[in-house]
Image (cartoon, helix red, strand yellow):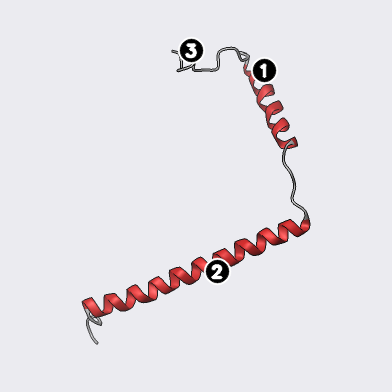
Amino acid sequence: MTDDAGGTSSGGSGPKNPFSRTWLFLKQVFDELRKVIVPTRRELLNYTVVVLVFVLIVIGIVTGLDWVLGHLSELVFGGGAGG
């Protein structure tokens, strides 16, 4: 089976030994981890504040929609059985 580029779909030229494939995978993982930039304390605090503010805004929107839709459903369907 081949892909659109004409190569094999399983990678083709990679190592066939499972230990070699595992070693290659781990090597690639560590290579990618070296590229990661750890944020400074100030950046981390800034990101945390942004996320918390965003979550509070979403909570406010969902609460407002719940309140509005709850009142609309009471207008449409009435106050329930016993009221």
User: Is label 2 in a helix, a strand or a loop?
Assistant: helix
Identify whether 16 is placed above or below 78.
above
Neighbour class for label 2 at 10 Å: few (<14), some, many (≥20)? few
| Mark 3 vs 1, N-terminal side | 3
Q: Quadrant of the N terminus?
A: top left
In front: mark 3 or mark 1? 3
Residue 67 horizontal/vertical position (percent): 38, 76
- Is the C-beta separation of discs 2 and 1 under 8 Å? no
Question: Label 3 vs label 1: CA separation?
Answer: 25 Å
Residue found at x 59% / y 67%: 53
Which one is earlier in the sequence, the residue at label 2 or at label 1? 1
Give the residue type that dot 2 points to: Leu
Where does the image place residue 12, in percent across and percent down from the top left?
55, 13
Q: Which residue is mark 1?
A: 20
Front one among 55 and 77: 55
Q: Residue at x 56, y 64 (%)?
A: 54
Indicate whether 21 appears above or below 73. above
Q: Residue 69 lies in what quarter of the image?
A: bottom left
Q: Residue at x 61, y 15 (%)?
A: 14
Which circle marks residue 6 in the picture?
Answer: 3
Vertical relation: 40 (above or below) 66: above
For label 1, count other residues whose C-alpha is less than 10 Å away and answer few (under 14), some (14-19) or many (20+).
few
Kindly identify which residue carries mark 2.
56
Name the element at disc 1. helix
CA–CA distance in space, label 3 to label 2: 51 Å
Q: Amino acid at mark 1?
A: Ser
How many C-alpha atoms fall within 10 Å of the one at disc 3: few (<14), some, or many (≥20)? few
For badge 3, the amino acid type reads: Gly
Mark pair 2, 1: CA separation:
49 Å
Residue situated furthest front in the rendering: 5
Horizontal side of 15 relative to 69 (left or right) equals right
